[in-house]
Amino acid sequence: MAAGGLLLRLAGPAGDPRAARAGLPPVAAALLLAALPLALLAIEAVTATSGATGIDHARVAEAALNTIVTAIISTTIALALGGGLALLVALTDMPGRRALSGLALLPMLIPSQIAALAWGRLFDPAGPVAGWLGLTSFGAHPLEGAAGVWLVMGLEHSPIGFLAVIGAATRIPAEPAEAARIAGAGPAAALAVAARPLIRPALAAAAALGLISAAGNFGVPALLGIPGAYPVMATLIYQQMSGFGPAGLGDVARLAALLGLGTLILLHLSGRAAGRAARVADSGRIIGRLPLRRGRRSLALLVWVPMLAISLGPLLALIAASLVPAPGVPLTATTASLDGFRMMVDPRHGALGAMATSAVLASLAAMASVLIAVPIGLFAARGGRAARLGAGAFDLALAMPGTVFAIAIILMLLPPLPVLDISLYGTPFILLAAYLGRFPALVLAPVMAAAGRLDPAPEQAARLAGAGVARRILAGAWPALAGPAAGGALLVLLTAFNELTLSALLWSRGAETIGVAIYARQAEGDTAAAAALALASLVASLALALAGLRLLARLPGLNAVFGDQR
């Protein structure tokens, strides 16, 4: 009773017992779905004895070193490409800046396994594009191995550098540049003087986030690293679990805990980098764009050509691969085949079932995330300490690499459930539980931002009228939170629909997801079916995004997410 009373006092806003009681279920869900699995993983890693499977320590050391090297090199590529493009867009008068920003953010919309598959088909020596480009002389696939993982992962994570730098570069004050010009500096040097205090900490924060993303990336190392015998920690965990199953869970838990510990260190460094962000006086005057003059068109050509090639080349290669009847066959008008698409729609091959499974699980996760995240975000924004604890648990679960959280979920749900005496392992429900532990943070962030700016007057009036907590939230808070919550739900829907990292370890026969289906067909050598399914997944994602954006346009409270654009 004492513990329950303490949690009741912590759950909701002070002085509102009914709100505190209403806040208990979502907070309990956060602790159960996000915090408990990670706690069990930590306990298992410390207490488990070495399993019968054993771990090749030399291979673990190699995978750990490869993870570090991959994270550093791919992050460097991401910052150079994304950050450099952001500086050109924000600080110069180069033509087509808005369209370039769209191209720079395009990799965010493409799941890592599809990006790796597309780049792999672009440079496949046996593929149709390689014949057109004269790349058939390669004996082995040039991207299957370390260099390919570094390059594709760097390109995939380049939006991190772009977003970090563009945010800092668009608010550079004019005064430092003017002072530098008075001191004799040229336009470019003055711009550098003014920009450096804001750009440097933004790059440091982006570097930490890039390292975290690279350390937990599974799709790119799985499709390009495993065939090229280049292991990283995420794929080593997958291979160990796939090879030995639950019998090797103790050893795998230690590997997952090691990767999770590295992620926590990177999160700490990210927080420190964000804390060191420069604070400059803002007079309201922003520095003007640097005129490129005669070099404007030449520089635009040098930027636009590779950006179009990077954006459209892999997509065209994916389309070409889906139309080739077999690897090594050139794509011509007479050899083009739709067998890959026919196989995709054939119920016997299970591709449509995989897409349906992903759609159902992602939809359930999106709706449940809203039900859980809205009260937690609302109460956390108003000082509920347990609600903040629940929000922190969700944030940590999202920050952890997907393979780490998948192992944690297995540890929690492999034993039979109390009272019911059934195990969820090997059922679709374990995937749903993993989604509900990992993705509500995508709804929490915009909801908490909007809840912090809510006018409490409507809810107070409803409370004085005797309305219950749920009715007060619907009447007073929901109109302002609907837009942010729906935006977060759309992110959950798109992320869960295409994810591979969790489902690679948690899927079961008869409950294959779209990410697993694409990876399995590529691993089996059926490149046409894999490419066709990847294209169908992209089209479905685009349709979901467009439908979701149309719905968002009709909901209130969108300024809380996107800001006033007038």
Image (cartoon, rainbow, N blue to C red):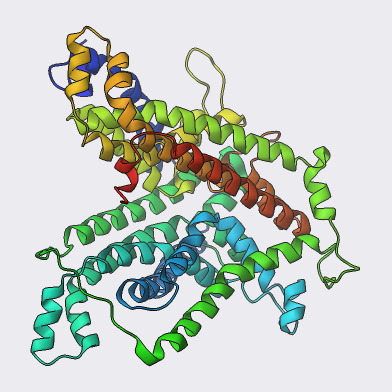
Nearer-the-camera pick, 433 or 351: 351
Q: Is residue 13 left or right of residue 293?
A: left
How many marks do you count on the picture?
0
Quadrant hosting residue 441:
top left
The N terminus: image quadrant: top left
As displayed, is residue 124 above or below residue 463?
below
Write the residue at 69% across / 63% down: 318
Q: Residue furthest front?
A: 566
Q: Is residue 265 visible?
A: yes
Q: Is residue 525 visible?
A: no
As displayed, is residue 409 above or below residue 260?
above
Write the residue at 65% across / 67% down: 120
Nearer-the-camera pick, 85 or 25: 85
Q: Position of residue 478 (x, y in %)?
A: 33, 26
Q: Is residue 172 left or right of residue 217?
A: left
Q: Position of residue 271 (x, y in %)?
A: 23, 55
As displayed, is residue 303 above or below residue 542?
below
As displayed, is residue 556 above or below residue 76?
above
Nearer-the-camera pick, 18 or 137: 18
Q: Is residue 91 left or right of residue 325?
A: left
Q: Residue furthest top?
A: 466
Q: Position of residue 106 (x, y in %)?
A: 50, 61
Q: Is residue 68 left or right of residue 390?
A: right
Write the residue at 39% across / 47% down: 400
Q: Position of residue 18 (x, y in %)?
A: 23, 12
Quadrant hosting residue 546:
top right
Nearer-the-camera pick, 177 or 396: 177
Quadrant hosting residue 166:
bottom left
